[in-house]
Image (spheres, rainbow, N blue to C red):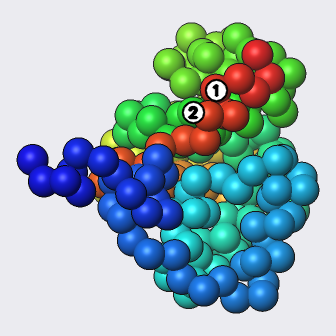
Amino acid sequence: MGEQDQTKVGAMAGVMALDLPLAEPTPDMAAYFQKCRDKIGYVPNVLTAYAHDMAKLEAFATFYNDLMLAPSGLSKLEREMIAVAVSSENKCFYCLTAHGAAVRQLSGDPVLGEMMVMNYRAADLPPRQRAMLDFAVKITRASYEIGEQDRQALRDIGFNDRDIWDIAAVAGFFNMSNRMASAVDMRPNAEYHSTAR
């Protein structure tokens, strides 16, 4: 085992298995990182992992913020629930830790957060949220099997077509993110483990 294998050095140590040099931050991304520090006290490791390439970081942050924070027929909690259900299917340690913490925080219910991480079907969810998560998991397991009957089932329970788009977009984004996080062994910030317990 080489010296570099034995001791991880560099900016990415503790963030992921790849030791990529940090790029010079753009003013927008420097301000974004500072906003993270001011608001939550740290920069999420996923952002640090992307910070070796400012174009990729900006694209990731823009898409994430639009999907998870912009106005939607889905609540912020529901979008986090999708993130956790998808991440549970994919067994993504980073996203289960980070977004499980978000579910605990947004719901005010640590038990719900744990159920979502382990198996959302164990949670006593309203039919609307159960249908939403079933659809997100079907996208994760076998998106090619989705047909009009699946979309219609969501309409029948109260989702409109924009909501269905948002469910699919959040599920799709986290399927990509889970695969990236697992491939590079991305590690969650320690702060997530104790959030809202």
Seen at 60% across and 16% down, the residue is 115
* Residue 31 visible: yes
Circle 1: residue type:
His
Which residue is painted at 80% across and 23% down in the image? 196
Q: Residue furthest left?
A: 1
Image side of residue 176 versus residue 55, left or right: left
Q: Is residue 137 visible?
A: no
Q: Name the kind of residue labelled 2 in the image.
A: Thr
Q: Residue at x 46, y 47 (%)?
A: 14
Q: Residue furthest front?
A: 3
Residue 48 rendering spot, x and y as whole percentages: 57, 63
At which x and y percent is residue 111? 70, 11
Q: Is residue 181 above or below residue 127?
A: below
Mark 1, other Cα within 10 Å: few <14 / some 14–19 / many ≥20: few
Report which residue position mark 2 lands on: 97
Q: Is residue 30 left or right of residue 130?
A: right
| 2 and 1 marks in contact (CB < 8 Å) | yes
33 relative to 87 in the view: left or right: right
Q: Which residue is mark 1?
A: 193
- Near-viewer residue (173 or 146): 173
Q: Quadrant of residue 6?
A: top left
- Using the image, determine if residue 125 lies above or below residue 149: above
Which of 28/180 is in front?
Answer: 28
Alpha carbon distance from label 2 to label 1 = 7 Å
Q: Residue at x 39, y 57 (%)?
A: 9
Closest to the observer, 55 or 155: 55
- Label 2 or label 1, whichever lies nearer to me, is 1
Q: Earlier in the sequence, mark 2 or mark 1?
A: 2
